[in-house]
Image: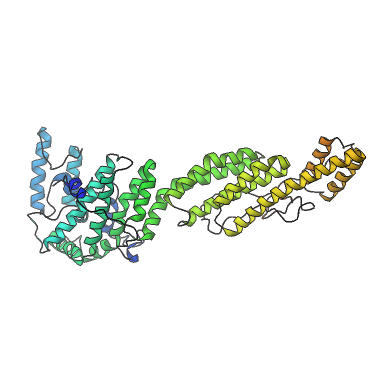
Amino acid sequence: MEPDAALRQARDRRSFDLDGQVMFGAGEADWAAQGAGDATVAALRDVAGADLYRRNAFRITGVSTYANRRAVRERRQRVTTALQVGADLDLGHTLPVGPEEVRAAFDRLLDDPRRRLVDELFWLWDTGDATCACLSSLHADHDEAVRAHCAALDREADGPEVADPELKGLWESAARSWQAVLRRAAFWDHVRHRITALDDRQLGESAVDELRKEFATALLRPITDLAARNQRDQARLANLARRWPAPSIAIDDQLETVAAPCYEAVNTALTAANDRLQEGETALAAAMVYTDVLPELRRLDTLVPHDRHRRTAGVRNDTAILLNNCAMTLMDSAGPVGESSALNWLATGLELASDEHMRQAIETNEDQVTEFVQTFEQITNQARSLMAAYGPAVADGFLGDLRRQAAGTPGVALIDKLRRDLGTDRGGIRPVPMPRRSRTAFRLAFWAVLVAGAIFMLNECSSDSSGTAAPVPPAVSQVW
């Protein structure tokens, strides 16, 4: 029986808000650790995904979920014979299945009782040949959940419109219906009855307990599977997953699995940008952050928001570190002319940083960059005034005194440039090359002789960074 009327039925149902609803206990959240050796659970994990109903053996073959082995064999004989001669065959659905897929579905029903039991959970129970003593309301409620869930996934497979209220209604109906059914102990009594009726030694009472632990995650998996397949619609699907009535730990784990390629792309891009910075290509390094890293970070925040996922917060902090280091390196080499770019990079880094210590350090750097530019402007104006009033020798003496105080810092190169620009340099002071950069945890302001305070070069990852985060961008050793 095909759930063709599901869209019409869902249209008549009230809208249902999933926010804040919890339907399962925390004990059902651990997908990976519990029941790993149970073959029935393995079968459940195998079917869980966007094709949950598309691959259902009962849907493909048109066989009732209560059919015994004899009835399945007879149905297989009729269907395979018709397929061999190319006769028109009504399987009760319009799925695009070929002969081999139909044969494989029959084989699963006859040869794998554990897979058959799992497929029964996701197909129709309220049929005329029901053999159990369950209340008819249980079967009807179960089938309502199956029809809505199946119709939602079929519509997703067809490529829904950006705004599809009917699809939204189907998802809400599926969540509400599954929530109601799984709260009823009779649901699992039905499963126990089916294990008894199948009478196969590969099935036992333990299968019920293990299925019960895993079922919530299996119902969530189709949504996250769709999110992994459809990058264009990930925001909607991720939001749907977060609102699905399942344990939050299962939702977070599955979404982080979906986001794994994005995490890898961020780390790769950060490493490449940091390499450019170490090779002296500061502007290129910062540009790579904006073109290669930030788009991936925005996608990550859609899938796995940094306020909920420590791993996302970690890569954002790593990016903030790199932008801070680009800004400080630019100020080292370019001086005041680098102010605009440096402040832009620091502002972006501040937006990304979630670690409070890091935010304070970046804010200090912003203040010190501004103060340094103002101080350097005062130095320039003072030197020009001295030169106009007393001649270049006095101005050069003033700058020479500052140069000696700044010995061993990048400030020496900037003072030498100012002397050349003003024409005061008479060759009495030999320019000192900028010291070679090396790694360090922090750096003081190289204009500390002129500007009170310190500008820190960050070189530590947030404590929230995961072990898979990109290498921390190295800092600059000389003081500012």
Q: Is residue 322 visible?
A: no
- The residue shown at (18%, 49%) is 9
- The residue shown at (32%, 52%) is 221
Q: Residue furthest top?
A: 86
Image label count = 0
Nearer to me, 176 or 111: 176
Q: Is residue 12 above or below residue 192?
A: above
- The residue shown at (10%, 41%) is 79
Q: Toward which corner of the image does residue 213 lie, by quadrant? A: bottom left
| Way the structure is coloured | rainbow
Q: Is residue 123 above or below residue 384?
A: below
Q: Is residue 133 above or below residue 258?
A: below
- Image location of residue 362, percent across then percent down: 63, 53
Answer with left or right where residue 337 lies relative to residue 186: right
Answer with left or right where residue 344 lies relative to residue 394: left
Nearer to me, 321 or 369: 369
Answer with left or right where residue 465 lies relative to residue 324: left
Answer with left or right where residue 235 lies relative to residue 4: right
Q: Is residue 317 visible?
A: yes
- Image location of residue 399, percent across then percent down: 85, 44
Q: Toward which corner of the image does residue 396 lie, by quadrant? A: top right
- Image location of residue 197, percent across then percent down: 12, 61
Q: Toward which corner of the image does residue 90 lie, by quadrant? A: top left
- Image location of residue 63, percent across then percent down: 12, 48
